[in-house]
Amino acid sequence: MRRNYESEENMGSGATEAVMGEKPRVPDGGWGWLVVVGGLITFLLWSGFLKAMGVLLPSLTVGLTHNTALTGEVAAMVAGVRSLTGPLAGPIGERFGYRPVVMVMSLIAACGIISASFAQTTIQFLLCLSVISGVGFSAPIILTKAMIGRYFDHRFALAMSLASAGDSLSMIIIAPTAQVLLDTYGWRGALLLYGGLCLHIIAAGALLRNPPSSDEDKSGYTSIPSADEITDPTKATDQAPARSKSLLETFNLSIFTKFVFWMIGLVMLGTYLIGISWYLYFIPHAKAKGFDSSQAVTFVAAAGVGQIITKIVWGKLIDQRVVSVRFGLVLCITLCSLALAIDPFLNTFWPMMIVTIIFGSFFGLVYCLVDVLAKEIAGEDGLASAFGYIDLVGGIARIFLGSVPGWIYERTGSYDIAFVVLGGLYLIVLMPVIAEWIIHRRQVLSNEKHSDKS
């Protein structure tokens, strides 16, 4: 079984190497661990912003928008605009460099949140957060993940698990902190201070240094060509002359021809919808069930702890080819769907706590598994574009469906129906995942038979 999993997860990258030639050596560590730290900070503050908006949602509704669905739509627009601008992050990063692009866009994102704290109307609030912060957050997320892919190959799943642990930490740290800031300074003061915290993403972006090329030695220094190589161009290099990339290559449009990409897109369509809904409405939902603010925040924090442990353990298992990425997706989606479906029956503390931990643990793992699949189908060079297109598909759900739970609450006075509907929609997404898994397994077995015959 372990052999089958290994061949299954390596099939996409093996095909790429056959066409492109020998795969460049990836450091699998070194400075890459600092890039992972930068990713952790970026995920912590971006995901923390969405969770903070969930904490601030009741106060924002009373003090500004006067409509729960409208407040939720503002937050969903921020995440949606970030996703819709994702495909531009890769080409811009390649043109101007990952580090400067991430640092500049992080400054823009922070300024948008700070500006929103001074908004007097819903339109001003929407423009500050969606147009300014939404666009600003796009490049840091996409390019940081792509840079991790440049540094890690055999440890990529573990590296992404550690970086995305920032998302889990935000459930432990940011949600309680946002509640304290809200109680102390009000929603305007809380947003102002959180915008200042997001300036730390600039420092995280400064860590995005390209891995050493084949022309560099282990000390990080680039070798200087000899005088003969300078005067005689034929001795300098045997590489083909540089050429400008076509539109197809620049935006990596060939990825749209792969069935597995569309499967991932459907998974993220459901995942982004459920994610933005859960982040925004879970705490108000828990309060509506009769739990107080401290208990609601405790549920979120416990889910964060479970998510960190699950990501690290599964990241290690996937890197060692003990379990399959596709099996992990099927398991995660099934458990999360069931957790949402039984939500109406969770009205006491411990059942709510246990199910929330299960949901949070495996829901967060979906993002890591999708990142691993994205590298499998796109390779190291096309990773930024792949992440951007996956975000684009998910952004559609965030913008057009992110306010659905709030809309249902406005009309029924309960979030129970909304969470059950989300669970049912996620279960539908499971069908193409299983279909692609079966097709992929047949291809693997077919390749193994041909290799045994040869």
Image (tube, grey):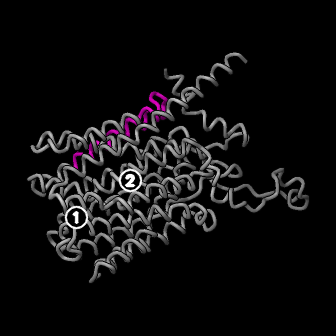
Identify the residue shown where x is 64% and y is 42%. Answer: 25
Residue 317: mark: none
Q: Position of residue 98 (x, y in %)?
A: 56, 63
Residue 247 appears at what percent x and percent y? 69, 61
**Mark seen at residue 272:** 2
Query: Residue placed at 54% from the left, 27% from the top?
Result: 441
Q: Magenta segment range?
A: 301-329
- Report the quarter where the C terminus lies: top right
Based on the picture, tell me whether residue 258 belongs to the magenta stretch. Answer: no
Q: Which residue is mark 1?
A: 178
- Give the residue drawn at x 21%, y 50%: 417
Considering the whole magenta stretch, tell me its main secondary structure. helix
Q: Is residue 238 left or right of residue 321?
A: right
Residue 194 in sight: yes
Amino acid on which disc 2 is placed: Tyr
The quarter of the picture where residue 78 lies is bottom left
Query: In this rendering, would 279 be left or right of 241?
Result: left
